[in-house]
Image (cartoon, rainbow, N blue to C red):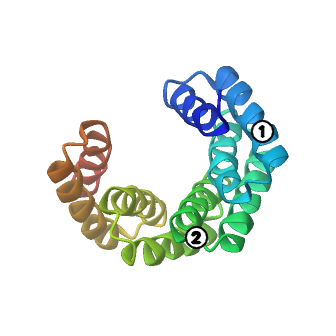
Amino acid sequence: MSAIVRTNLGAAELANGDTGRAFVYLNDAVVALEEAGARGQLAETQRYLALTHLAVGDVASAHAAAALALTLAREAEAPMDEAGAQRVLGQIAQASGELEEAVVALEASRILLSDQGNRYELAQTLTGLAEALLAQDRRQEAHDLLVEAVEVFTELDASRDLARAAGLLRTVDA
């Protein structure tokens, strides 16, 4: 099984809430990618590994994996991977109560994604940034970002993401 398939299976297991299986697939992918010298692909795998660590509450390991993902993405000159790593660093900062750091990382992700044309990833980042802004009681800024995210998720028929963004928007508007 290829390392890319392992990464994708790890990401799917994480999305399904099975962090144990996610760790197995992602750690296997890391080993295979390191052996192959595929540092560019390793950035994405490390990002999913960071999210898995965050899901089990291991903030220190999550931060280490996300920081490595960011370094690898920059080395590979891969702006999409860099944006993804910045988004995860923002999520980690928010989970740690470091709201200003979260906003900085999520803004960096938004700037990178604005130039890439990937509206789905941009809407994901907008939703995360809105959450960080809400935690700072910056409701109007959060509202504007969520309106944009809801529009994108609606156009793309991304129902799970739409439900999350729309729910946050209802919270802001309440």
- Which residue: 73% across, 25% down? 24
The type of residue carrying mark 1 is Ala
Graded by Cα atoms within 10 Å as few (under 14), some (14 to 19) or many (20 or more), the crowding at tag 2 reads: many
In the displayed structure, does residue 160 sit left or right of residue 110?
Answer: left
Q: Residue at x 73, y 48 (%)?
A: 62
Q: Which quadrant holds the N terminus?
A: top right
Q: Nearer the viewer, residue 158 or 149?
A: 158
Tell me the SS state at disc 1. helix
Q: Amino acid at mark 2?
A: Ala
In the image, 16 versus 115, the foreground residue is 115
Percent of width and height locating residue 6: 63, 31
Where residue 84 appears, x then y in whole percent? Answer: 54, 59
Which residue is located at x 23 percent, y 51 percent?
Answer: 153
Q: Which mark, residue 105?
A: 2
Question: Which of the two marks, 2 or 1, is nearer to us in this view?
Answer: 1
N-terminal-most mark, 2 or 1? 1
Q: Identify the residue at image location x=67%, y=59%.
A: 40
Q: Nearer the viewer, residue 139 or 77?
A: 77
Above or below, 170 relative to 58: below
- Labelled disc at residue 122: none
Q: Picture coordinates of residue 89 (x, y %)?
A: 64, 60
* Label total for image: 2
Question: Pointer 1: what residue?
Answer: 32
Instruction: Please say if 18 is above or below 133.
Output: above
